[in-house]
Amino acid sequence: MSHVETRPADTAETGRAVTLVDCDVHAQATEAMLAEYLSSQTRRLLERYGRRTPRVTEWYPRARNAGMRADAWPGKPGHIWGSDPELTRAQLLDEFDVDFAVLEVLSGQDCYDDARLAAEWNRAINQWQLERWLEFDPRFRASIAVPHEYPDLAVNEIERCAADPRFVAVLLPASAAEPLGARKYWPIYEAATAHNRPIALHTGGYVDHRGAGYPSYYLEYHVGNGIVMQSQLAGMVAGGMFEAIPGVRVVLTECGVAWAAALRWALDSAWRLMREDLPDLGRSPSEQIREHVWFTTQPIEEPADAQHLIHVIGQAQLEDRLLFATDYPHWDFDSPRQALPRAMAPELRRAILCENALALYGLPRER
Amino acid sequence: MSGSVSPAIDCDVHCAPESYDALFPYLSEYWREYVEEAGIRLSALPYAYPPGAPTTASAQAHAQTGNPTPANYESLRERVLEPGKLRYAVLNCLSGFGTHRNGYFAAAIASAINDWLREEFLARDERLRASLIVSTISSEDAVAEIERVGDDPRFVQVLLPVRSEKPWGNPSRHPIFAAARERSLQVALHAWGRAGQAPTPSGFTTTYLEDYVANEAIAQAQVLSLVSEGVFNRFPDLKVVLTECGFAWLPPLLWRFDKDWRGVWREVPWLKRLPSEYVTEHIRATTAPAHLPDDPAAIRQLLEMLDAGALLTYASDYPHDHGDGVSALLGQLDDPARQAVMAGNAAALYGLEL
């Protein structure tokens, strides 16, 4: 097992102040791009059998330009949306003066693989991120992709990548075989926390819609991403992981933010009534969420009255917990210039656009 | 409260037979023998309402002898109608939310419950109305039951569980809405449903806390389904009452729903208006549970985002107990809004005279 070489932390070469951190950028690897990092046995397995789970895009075709920005197609042989760091650099980093962009590579998060394939695939993703992105531009940061259904293997991969500070988070999907608060996944959270990395839980993963059953349309599914994360957060609170893993930090990614207030009220209300029988939950749910949970902004909700959004941010105590994200190159990309309402106070805007991310990821204030 | 308030309409009052014995008069010999042979007992929904859980019954209800859920007219009158000084009460009997999958049994039980409701309660007090119980396994059976008893004006709505195997907007379910509207019935989606299937999108809950709040997430998914599938386009007179599912979650959901629809409206071309407009017109919610912040200023902010006076219908949810949220909510409403919530909205929904 090769360890990622330690790189020296970026120093302030130019001395310009950081003003914008994008906390959810999708680099997408094709299977061909990952193949060079896979064993020949795994390459052959994939050639013969492929991945064994339908992709989310087969379940719910993205009824808007295949789910991507119309202008984000690289037009280079072998490349797809989000696979070309040159285009991402031009369209995102340079266009919007992004100081740091945190990559979330979702390729294959929605597939239920055997242990060998899962381990190799995620290792390949991380090597691809390192060689093709982190080495390409110093503004990129990466999330450690892990074989999350195999926590011991996931811990191995975290250990392998953690020495490189440019891997700033550990990435899991929002829908997994078990609820994400389940004890099964705690070793992953403990390892991430031991290496001072937050866990990014990104919308997506297996497609399963118990509770109300399978929706018919991408519209329902897409709005439903917020509902999925509500369920996951409720489970994380109730299952006690925030009490059991004191330093754990979770970034709820690409699920919206405005639902957090009402969920906190419901959980607190229920906890007050039931707390005698929840001995592992010493703190109220809202205290736990306040302490341990961050949210990326995209897709930011846009009520007709922008003040309402600002109210719910306050109600959920999210001022120092929101992390700006564009979700490049997806169709519902949030532009840094337009996504946050004008009514927002400058301090809050600045916190969301960079301060909160600098604090969470330990990024330098100047570069 | 200032000003005179007309007596309230309580839109979620629970009753349940003590046992299958109470339903035997309404079941065929085959089903009586089945119940006895299979050794089954009528479920009091212990997974939804654990007998000892604080939310299952208020201290006062627990203090009653026997089952806190009224099983006969006398106990209902004594515990709910008289103390509440109610003008009307809508009875929701959840005993049909079974775990079993036998469609014939589900249909038989639904019919038996409706007959029991009529004889035990509806015939004995003109203040009483009820939700019409149907099979949740078969849309055809549900339609048959609506056709059987739906002309009885004392049934005001069809009761469906909020938990389902397919979201309620799915076209396979539309015949239920058609049958309901043919008889001027609304539809209620009530918390809980079939036990034993995972209530979240990612698996089973292990604590009651999670399961309890899961009703709210599921209700949200049902709202998305009802609107997206064009239920309100096909049935423009239909109202759906989210019952015991909360409501404070609605504004953020609609912000996202509207925004996403603007992006992918081509996928659902039958929607001619913003999703939130359909919801405003066609969705209602009962007041209990009201999971609200402690801070009255935050409640006022919520009330700016949500037209409580239009959306909500009062419900005690007797005997269930969710804390003080409802009184905190009502205390923040002005008189017209409070009047609408306490009686006006339900009267309009169900065609009731005040």
Image (cartoon, coloured by chain):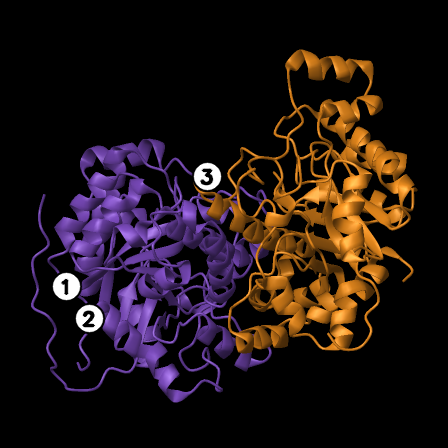
Chain colours: A purple, B orange
Q: Chain of mark 3?
A: B
Q: CA distance from mark 2 to mark 3?
A: 36 Å
N-terminal of the two: label 1 or label 2?
1
| Relative to A180, residue B86 above or below | below
Q: Nearer the viewer, residue A203 or A193?
A: A193
Near mark 2 (Cα within 10 A), the count class, few <14, some 14-19 or many ≥20, is few
Judge if badges 2 and 3 mark residues of a common chain.
no
The kind of residue on which mark 2 rests is Gly
Q: Residue at x 34, y 83 (%)?
A: A350
The residue wearing badge 1 is: A165
Mark 3 Cα within 10 Å, few/some/many (few <14, many 20+)?
A: some
- Please state if A78 lies on the left or on the right of A140 as rendered: right
* Residue A245 located left or right of residue B199: left
Q: Considering only vertical position in the picture, is A293 above or below A242?
A: below
Considering the numbered disc 1 on the image, is that residue within a helix, a strand or a loop?
loop
Label 2 sits on residue: A362
Whether marks 1 and 2 lie on the same chain: yes
- Where residue B346 sits, quadrant-wise, is bottom right
Query: Dot 1, crowdedness within 10 Å: few (<14), some or many (≥20)?
Result: many
Q: Quadrant of the N terminus of chain B?
A: bottom right
Mark 3: amino acid: Phe
The secondary structure type at the circle numbered 3 is loop
Q: Is residue B301 left or right of residue A127?
A: right
- Disc 1 marks a residue whose amino acid type is Pro
Query: Viewer-nearest of labels 3 and 1?
Result: 3
Residue A276 x %, y %: 42, 48
C-alpha separation, residue under disc 3 versus residue under disc 1: 36 Å
Q: Foreground: A198 or A36?
A: A198
- Foreground label between 1 and 2: 2
Element at badge 2?
A: loop
